[in-house]
Amino acid sequence: MLWSLLPMVANAANPTAVSILQPSCWAVGSLSEALEGVARSEVRWRCGDRDYTLDGERVLLRFDIDPAQALPRHLLSRRSALQAVHLLAIDADGGLRRASFAPGQLQNALAGGYFELPLSDVTRQTRQLIVAFDRPTHRMVLEQAHLASIDSAPTTRHLLLLAGLCGMLLMPLVFNIAFYRVLREPFVLWHGALAVSLLSSSLVSSELAPVLLDLPAMTLSWMTTLVFGMTIASGVMFTASFVEPEHMNPRLRRALPYCAVAALALSAFHAAFPYVARPVQSMFYTAAFGPILLVVLCALVDALRRGSRAARFQAVGWTPLLLVGLVRLVTGVVPGLTSNDAETLFHIGCVFEVLSTAMGVADRLMTLKHQRDQAQTEAAVLERLSAHDALTGLLNRRAIETRFEEFRANGYDTLAVLDLDHFKSVNDQFGHGVGDAVLKATAAALQPDAQVQAFRLGGEEFVLLLRGDDGAAQAERRRQAIPSRVAAAVPELARPVTASMGVIRLAPAAHLDTHFQPCFDRADKLLYVAKGDGRNRSAFAPEHAFELTT
């Protein structure tokens, strides 16, 4: 794809590779001067010198017509703001024919980035054609003006390759939409904005513009300027948000948004007011992007130096586009150099940007997703640890207090408070190690399952939440299982370990008992009833028809 694109973009950068005629001389004049007078004054013409200047209000180019060659039929030049174009055909017998065109009459050429005018007044008798540009705003209008004998329409293959390039620029948009739904990171949006800007730039400056957009040539001219600023701004903001936070100097990161605003402001001003300082405005406009380019380069170099993985992808993808900016900057500012917008390199850079940066975005998103998944896993582990008793593994008081309403909503309507009898004597006689083993065995006897939630509130005190019509019976079975479970797990004990329990049935209306403490207090009072009645037994609320078991 890339190698097949190279000849295509080469032709786009030099659309006159067919039968062309370059100007032989040029002159400057004022708008008040008669065009014919300047044309006939030989001392005004500079020949063999293409170091054009915009100092004059009007710049004239002279083309020498050879009647033995194919007659030129089109004038082509780069789109840029100007106030009028005049054509003056001079015949061998001295006859003159003049035509003038306002900016709105300039037609888009099928060669990308050019406008064209028909040369209907050029005949076999014509020896010279004078082309006068009123108040041109860019040297490229003069440097790339030429006459063509045949239409330089792009081939179908040419257009298909350009359309393929635009299709590639649409791919990041699809990926970004999918990625943003997973991880809402701002750099995904900025990369989408960059893709839109590159796509827009390819459309307005290529052969697809007259085919798809059908806009006036001067409209496409200011659109090209504005889209260029949008491309720089979105690219700068993408860099600021894409490179990992710890891998860029904070001052450089803070400077990037200012650079983005400056790029937009410069392009918007130049597009809206191209004649404010016309002779030097284009040069200063181009030069103003120098500091922006420098900051971006410093940011990338700094990120690479700090080991940024994201910057590696971006450096590969952006190298051709940064070179485009450098070429435009140098040729637009250095005197004596012919302006070059590096269209060939720009299209190649678009391919690199799509392939490399899109992979970088995917890689960064996968990294972020892994980090978030790991953080969520760690948070879940910490949440589980904070909700569970470290010794027994049962849920703790925090868990029952914070989730009591949830448990009630899920049908848990029986609450039992259980306390081991004479547990302090176990610790005093056998030590805390044996005491801990007794607590673990008690937790195993309580047997949490789908119908029972078991909690350790602290010390030797436990709580059960149960659901089902036999909730109280399930609680009682677990209480009675404690002595045998402890005896099997802690054989060194000389006596059995028993438990006392208080059991209540919770009100059926959830809003009556959605807070844990009042419910606990009711069951706790019954627990003390059981202990007062001799321990190793349960005390049930009156509505439960269960015998107290000793």
Image (spheres, rainbow, N blue to C red):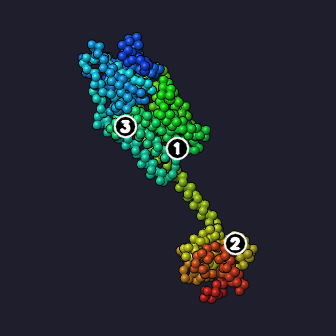
The image position of residue 17, as x and y in percent, is: 32, 26
Label 3 CA crowd tier, 10 Å (few <14, some 14–19, many 20+): some
Give me the disc on residue 215: 3
Find residue 524 and report its image quarter: bottom right
Of marks 1 and 2, which one's residue comes earlier in the chain?
Answer: 1
Q: Horizontally, is 263 left or right of 33 in the view?
A: right
Disc 1 from disc 2: Cα separation: 52 Å
Nearer to the camera, 67 or 251? 67
Check disc 1 and give the amino acid type.
Answer: Phe
- Is 384 drawn above or below residue 435 in the view shown? above
The image position of residue 70, as x and y in percent, is: 25, 21
Give me the disc on residue 242: 1
Label 1 CA crowd tier, 10 Å (few <14, some 14–19, many 20+): many
Disc 3 from disc 2: Cα separation: 82 Å
Quadrant housing the C terminus? bottom right
Nearer to the camera, 252 or 509? 509
Query: Foreground mark, 3 or 2?
Result: 3
Provide the secondary structure element on which disc 3 rests: loop
Residue sitting at x 44%, y 52%: 178
Disc 3 from disc 1: Cα separation: 35 Å
Check disc 2 and give the amino acid type.
Answer: Gly
Q: Horizontally, is 437 left or right of 11 in the view?
A: right
Residue sitting at x 49%, y 40%: 234
Provide the secondary structure element on which disc 1 rests: helix
Residue sitting at x 42%, y 29%: 80
Quadrant housing the N terminus? top left
Q: For mark 2, what is the residue?
A: 459
The image position of residue 271, as x and y in percent, is: 47, 33
Label 2 CA crowd tier, 10 Å (few <14, some 14–19, many 20+): few
